[in-house]
Image: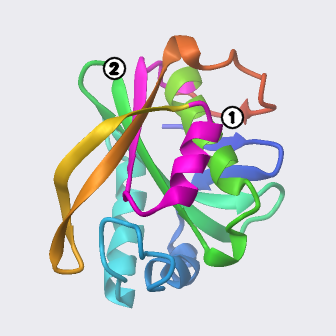
Amino acid sequence: MTPVHLAGPRLALREVEPEDTDALLAIYGDPEATRHLSFEPRTREQVQAITARSIASANATPRTEYCLAITRFGEHRLIGYARLATEPQQAATIGFALHPAEWGKGLGTETVHLLCALGFNVLGVHRIWAARSPLNEASARTLLRAGMTEDGRIRDHVFVHGAWRDSITYSILEQEWPPNGVLGIAADRES
């Protein structure tokens, strides 16, 4: 299996490596960074398990989960974590988290574009969807700016911070996605 490497104007997605654990802990262990995610801050051991699972998923056959490091273009240091999981019916779900120091720079929109390029251009899915916390307005703006459409609400979708929380869902279809290259995204991988 050829490793994933997608590059956009400012960011790149690459496979997760064991050395990414500390940088991922700086995100997943941070209460502010995880405030709107579907889980509470993670411990070092939990993040080490995420890193190990991410590496293992890259070697699975067939591969159904793409857990990837987000880096600045031309750099290697992880500044975020992105995930695309394929589903039946030619669909995939995506999610991502960036280090709080990277918030407000439009990097979330580029991350969604890179995940869509992976899903549509490389994997050939028909539909990609994402979910966000109802209180995460920044995520709403990011998903809409990336070309996704708000679909609706899943009631009591996740149990986090001791309570059930709804999720707002978004999707984009393959015919709504711009042709390869429109966003300056290059893929070094096919599956």
Task: State the residue at coordinates (70%, 61%).
Answer: 71
Where residue 115 appears, x then y in whole percent?
Answer: 55, 40
The boundaries of the magenta stretch are 122-147
Give the residue type that dot 1 points to: Asp
The residue carrying pointer 1 sits among few (fewer than 14), some (14 to 19) or many (20 or more) residues within 10 Å by Cα, namely few
Tell which circle, 2 or 1, labels the residue nearer the N-terminal end: 2
Horizontally, residue 47 falls left or right of residue 107, namely left
Mark 1: secondary structure = loop
Q: Check disc 2 and report its element: helix, strand or loop.
A: loop
Q: Which residue is mark 2?
A: 90
* Left or right, residue 30 beside residue 112: left
Q: Residue at x 41, y 68 (%)?
A: 36
- The colour scheme used here is rainbow
Horizontal arrangement in the rendering, residue 94 relative to residue 118 (left or right): left
Image location (x, y in percent) of residue 181: 77, 23
Instruction: Please state the horizontal and vertical placement of residue 124, each as a whole percent of the image.
Output: 47, 18
Q: Is residue 32 above or below residue 135?
A: below
Is there CB contact under 8 Å for labels 2 and 1? no
Please name the amino acid that badge 2 sits on: Gln
The residue at the far bottom in this view is 44
Residue 91 located within the stretch drawn in magenta: no
Q: State the count of labels.
A: 2
Residue 3 appears anywhere in the view: no
Q: Residue at x 39, y 88 (%)?
A: 44
Q: What residue sits right under mark 1 in the picture? A: 188
Above or below, 50 against 89 in this view is below
* Label 2 Cα crowd, 10 Å radius (few <14 / some 14-19 / many 20+): some
Q: CA distance from mark 2 to mark 1?
A: 22 Å
- The answer to whether one can see residue 131 in this image is yes
Q: Residue at x 35, y 46 (%)?
A: 168
| Percent coordinates x, y for residue 50 in the rendering | 36, 69
